[in-house]
Image (cartoon, rainbow, N blue to C red):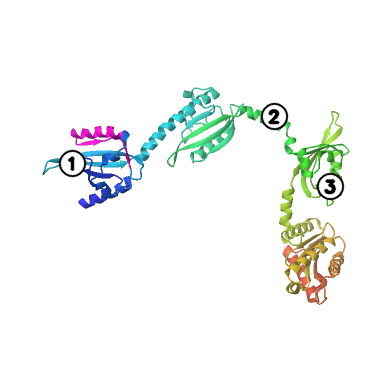
Amino acid sequence: MQNRYLEYFNDSPTLFIKFKGNSSKVEYITNNVTTLLGYTLEEVLDSNFSFESIIHKGDYKLIKDEIKELEFSNEIELSPYRVLTKNSNYIWIKEIRKKFYDNKINENHICSYISNITKEVNLKKNLFYTNKIIKTVYDNSVHLIALLKPNGTLIKANKTALEFINKDEKEIINKKFWDTNWWDESQKQIIKKDLKKASKGFLVHSEKKVLDEYYIELTIKPVYDENRVIYLVCEGKDITQAKKKEKKINHYNEIINKQLISITNKEGIIKECSDAFCELTGYDKNELVGKKHNILKHPNNNDDKYKDLWETITLNRTWKGKLKNKTKDGRSFWVENTITPNCDENGNIESYTAIYNNITTNKKIKEKLITDELTGIYNRRYFNKIFKKYYKKFQKYNEKFVLMIVDIDYFKQYNDNYGHSKGDEVLKDVAQTLKLNLRKCDYVFRIGGEEFAILVAINRHNVSKIIANKLKEAIYNLNIIHEFSFYRRLTISVGIKQINEKLLLKNKIEIFNEADKALYKAKQNGRNRVFTFFDT
């Protein structure tokens, strides 16, 4: 049984010591002395070791006087004091000393139970100083501060807050924070949700309107006891004046905040433009003022868009649209444009204000998503989208169209014998040639390795074959040498599917498959051919 007690003491966080008689020499000590003080058993039991020698000098006299009380009592609890560990750190300990007698020889012995209370002492100190700091900040803060229970019940409010709402503390204590008259009805439920979120440990920050005329920046902070939220601190900063100034600034600078602005007379001559607009276009202000906006016009733009623009604004209506422009050094940029007529007191137009939103990045991202990286023409993703659009238009408005599938003949042999680098060049040449020989309203896509798709809107019968043969001849006339082709030069085969009879309309997959079958027929019949599905 004694061994079991010793085992308990050795594993316990409490250190047990037996002193020799009334001295400070250690006769017995438990193994956990190493954990608590860093000394080995041998070092402590050495005759030269004295427990009194490790007591902090500032605590020694008090502890020595308290130990003397054992002369009149069998047990005492000493005041917390500091001892020096082997690694030269001081720790706070709590000690209980007991006196017991050996009945045989009637000699008294002293034993001691020691616990490390450093954490508790430090925590108590920190809490004391923290409370003093908090009280000072709380009492003198220019901000509105309220202390709540996690359920939103008001416990305390500082002087600043009480003066702001013109209330005595006793009028608001024990009320729910949201259920007070300084919030309007629309905000009460929001406040309730904010407090619920904060009670779960989140920091909540928002702007709130108070007493129908003031604005505060409200922060709700959770206060923890270990892992449990025990209080909520609400801190409000009066931002009423700042909000009023902000409203004025927003009102007077609504147009300026758009950043990109130009103003023209009613003939379209630029009278004024912002610095941001100059930076975007690459022109100095004196290079733009006195010029028309066509100095920025990109050649790819459709003239019909400009016609619509002028027809709209000259009727005293606002025009909105997207335009592609070019900078002074020739780079392209896209803007979302809003042009508003400015009228005099009689309602006559005297100028136009154009506000721009730079959407170049979005356009570039969009173009990248729909463009085949190698050839620069549209990719399979965009083909699926446009094919769907053509299909719907035919369903709804009977707008006829043609799907062509184009394949480069003997392309594998070209790649194998001339190399992939040459193969890539051929793909680029074919793609650009197909694009150049189509109308601007037609589409060409790379949908596979050497396979392309073309969508053409048609009104006349059999025009698709004329277009396909034109494309075939254009590739043939590139005169790209291909010694491993039957024709000794690069050629293409084309499969056509015309969608012009509503009664025979099939689904999109069937239409594509039928164009592909026509292509297969062209390949079977010697390549460098054009076949329409009904020819097959």
**Image quadrant where residue 281 sits:** top right
Residue 297: assigned label? 3
Residue under numbered circle 2: 248
Residue 447 image offset from top left, x and y in percent = 73, 64
Q: Nearer the viewer, mark 2 or mark 1?
A: 1
Mark 2 and mark 1: Cα distance apart in space? 87 Å
Residue under numbered circle 1: 21
Which residues make up the magenta segment? 59-84
Residue 28 image offset from top left, x and y in percent = 22, 47
Residue 190 is left or right of residue 377, and the answer is left
Residue 300 image offset from top left, x and y in percent = 83, 52
Residue type, mark 1 in image? Gly
Residue type, mark 2 in image? Lys
N-term-proximal mark, 1 vs 3 = 1
Q: Mark 2 packing: few (<14 Cα in 10 Å), some, or many (20+)? A: few
Q: Nearer the viewer, residue 166 or 420?
A: 420
